[in-house]
Amino acid sequence: MPAIATGAGVVVETIYRVFGSKAGLFRAVIEAVLAGGAKRAETPIEQRPAIRAVIEESDGRRQVDLYAATQPGIHRRGGPLLRALSAAAATDPELRDLWREMEAWRFGGQSRFVAMLADQDKLRSGLPIEDACDVVWTLCSLAVYDLLVIDRGWSDEQYRTWLSNSLARELLPEPRPPGSPASAAG
């Protein structure tokens, strides 16, 4: 924290007074980076333009496309800090608690997306909401992004397209072929 205080031109006590702890500072920085800036981090997630577009869209497939489009930027911006936090969590109990808190926060946001789809009757029939939440949490994880983009060299666009198609395949009903009846006789 001394280096941060020096860089900010303040005494170390100011950093502790504002953020409370190393984990508090890490949390504030991560939230700002994930939001795309400190000012945007002050705006509730549901009021940010990209998430508003997901919420206001009426077509389930388009909602999934819009949601998937948010993920590459989040991982690109937040990945370095989240990787550092994950590594530090192995040896620092305070940062381990923060890592768990951040993952719970991520799961909560993704669960709200699934709940919205379920409330709009857009989830695939027979798919339990809990399973759908786990699928979104896994597919949208930094680990999956890292495997495909960092390790395999995919572009963000390839990743976004794959993620959108994967989420649609796992969450949404099978699309009906053109001209087919709205419900099958059975």
Image (tube, rainbow, N blue to C red):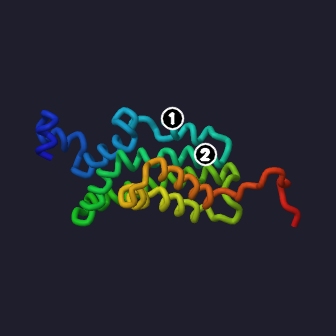
**SS for callout 2:** helix
Can you name the residue that lies furthest to the right here? 185
In this picture, residue 162 sits left or right of residue 27: right
Callout 1 amino acid? Pro
Compared to residue 13, the image places residue 98 above or below, namely below
Q: How many marks?
A: 2
Quadrant that contains the C terminus: bottom right
Q: Where is residue 56 in the image (x, y as percent from the top left)?
A: 62, 38
Q: Which of 60 and 93 is in front in this view?
A: 60
The disc placed on residue 49 is 1
Mark 1 crowdedness (10 Å alpha carbons): few <14, some 14-19, many ≥20: few
Callout 2 amino acid? Gln
Which residue corresponds to the image point at 43% horizontal and 50% vertical from the top-left? 155
Mark 2 crowdedness (10 Å alpha carbons): few <14, some 14-19, many ≥20: many
In this picture, residue 9 sits left or right of residue 157: left
Compared to residue 50, the image places residue 168 above or below, namely below
The disc placed on residue 63 is 2
Q: Where is residue 8 in the image (x, y as percent from the top left)?
A: 16, 35
Give residue 165's quadrant in the image.
bottom right
